[in-house]
Amino acid sequence: MQSSKHFRLDDFIAGWIGGASSVVVGHPLDTVKTRLQAGRGYKNTLHCILTIYRKETAMGFFKGMSFPLASITVYNSVVFGFFSNIQRALNKYRHGDERHRCSMLDLTLASMLTGLVSVGLGAPVDLVKIRLQMQTQMLPFRNDGTNIPLRSIDIPSQRLYRGPVHCISSILQTEGLQGLYRGAGAMVLRDVPGYTLYFIPYAIFCDLLTPDTSSNPHPCSIWLAGGLAGSISWVTATPADVVKSRMQADAQLQRKYKGILHCVLHSYKTEGAQVFFRGVSVNAIRGFPMSSTMFLTYELSLQFFKSL
């Protein structure tokens, strides 16, 4: 499972497997989170869940999942593969041994670099996912030159995007390549500190739950550490995630935000400071099962590859 002495391919494969399992577990709540952050008309989390179920049935929670299932698996493969390999590279450079135990400084640096690298692939993935999840939001129906009356679009023929491929091609035609990276700046602000507060708490909790440093963490310890790390990361990343979601849901036809600062100021002026914590409870809840599944599947996959 190695392509060179220091570069390991099994981390990428394990990340791919973990990513697939986490998408299936977390996508329903991710849809609720996106609707709460970028949509309108929802009083709270429960109201949002009931509204989606009543108007779109249970399938509404899985709207746009085919694209994340295909792409986020690759995304997580890159994230976990890069993180593990950059740790080994730092250990080799700083200590002369890639198996050396990572210091907190090395972990922080590897996490921040991972967050930065992840945006290159993650921004287009998130954009398409969010545009597909927001399909039942409003679209321009008639434009008289002043106000744009809107109506809900529940009939398939009225939907703006027929699927992931059509969504990508439409964005490229109307907004250009930079359109796929709308909200990327906000994603950097979310993911650089977000991944730092993802991998470091995981390492700390694993250490606390595994007193014997010579043994591998127990699956239950991995599951709990991963879940807690996911909740911590997502809760602290919520304000930047709100801005990112709003900018990515801000389609060309209804363009409202000029940039990150304009989005922050406009959201604050119109909805108050609490808007930046919209969906925080959903993030805390969904962060646990998604991350616990991700880390557990990833670690078990690595152990399986090493046993071959």
Image (spheres, helix red, strand yellow):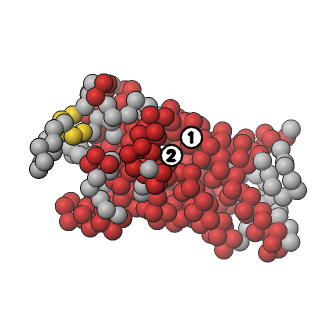
Residue that mark 2 sits on: 125
In the rendered structure, are the residues bearing label 1 and label 2 in contact, judged by CB atoms less than 8 Å apart?
Answer: yes
Q: Quadrant of the C terminus?
A: top right
Give the numbered dot on residue 174: none
Q: Residues within 10 Å of mark 2 (few under 14, many from 20)?
A: many
Q: Amino acid at mark 2?
A: Val
Q: Secondary structure at mark 2?
A: helix
**Whole-percent x and y of residue 179?**
43, 51
Q: Amino acid at mark 1?
A: Ser
Q: Is residue 207 left or right of residue 231?
A: right
Q: Is residue 221 left or right of residue 6?
A: left
Give the numbered dot on residue 71: 1
**Whole-percent x and y of residue 245?**
38, 52
Is residue 155 at all visible to an observer of this figure? yes
**Whole-percent x and y of residue 108?**
62, 69
Q: Quadrant of the N terminus?
A: top right
**Whole-percent x and y of residue 278?**
31, 54
Residue depicted at 40% across the width and 49% down the height: 175
Measured along the vertical axis of the image, is residue 304 above or below residue 255? Answer: above
**Which callout, 1 or 2, points at the residue further toward the start of the chain?**
1
